[in-house]
Amino acid sequence: GAVVSQHPSWVICKSGTSVKIECRSLDFQATTMFWYRQFPKQSLMLMATSNEGSKATYEQGVEKDKFLINHASLTLSTLTVTSAHPEDSSFYICSARDRGLAGGYEQYFGPGTRLTVT
Amino acid sequence: EDQVTQSPEALRLQEGESSSLNCSYTVSGLRGLFWYRQDPGKGPEFLFTLYSAGEEKEKERLKATLTKKESFLHITAPKPEDSATYLCAGHTDKLIFGTGTRLQVFP
């Protein structure tokens, strides 16, 4: 299967600072990438969808000025958490869509980034 | 409203004891039904995509099936390393996830 990487795998930052998380599709080109957030023992919550070269589409309730998403190329998307606060502490997971066999879609996930804001 | 429901929430099996996980969905304009495996502290690992009722796909001890209302993930003779949370998701223009089934397989 296709591989999606994320960096860093974990980060600790102080309240008020910004943190950037990178997501790369390693062996395929992803025209669409997604960012999710997951709380302990809960399912994934979609934050935003980004298409290469255009502005991200944010889900209802997600602050676009706080969670800046850039999809600059077909293999790289970044999520920047601006002015982070403790309530932003979470597990952030990116995902990339690849065209699968027979014209369908397959969507692959990165390993996740654990963000802790102190 | 589009919805995906998984059952049971948790399942404990003895090694070798086969069972099935259920995923019921009401998703308008469904383009596909995805199954993932997620280990603690990691991102979901892609298992299968099913596109039409009657379709079946297999991978090692796992077999996924799809009807017009639900999907099943059959686990045959599970091993302890199959322990994980299994997520299903309906695909429209985005994935709509169920809450998952936490599977524990004991030796």
Image (cartoon, coloured by chain):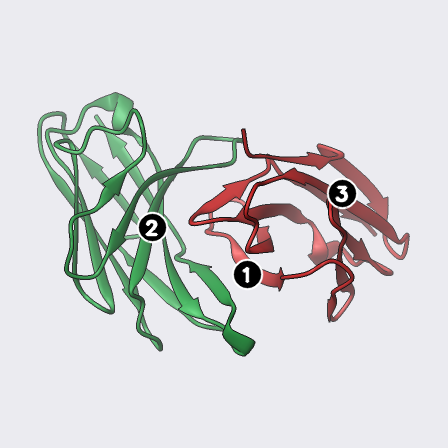
Horizontal arrangement in the rendering, residue A43 relative to residue A68 (left or right): right
Are the numbered discs 2 and 3 placed on the same chain, yes or no? no
Residue indicated by mark 3 = B22
Between disc 2 and disc 1, the foreground one is 2
Horizontal arrangement in the rendering, residue B4 relative to residue B15 (left or right): left
Q: Colour of chain A?
A: green
Marked residue nearer the N-terminal end (1 or 3): 3
The chain letter corresponding to red is: B
Tell me the amino acid under the disc marked 1: Phe
Residue indicated by mark 2 = A34
Q: Are marks 1 and 3 in contact (CB under 8 Å)?
A: no
Residue B58 picture location, percent across and down: 74, 69
Residue at 9% over, 26% down: A16
State the quadrant of the N terminus of chain B.
top right
Residue indicated by mark 1 = B46
Residue A113 picture location, percent across and down: 33, 47
What element does badge 1 sit on?
strand
The chain that hosts pointer 2 is A
Horizontal arrangement in the rendering, residue A97 relative to residue A100 (left or right): left
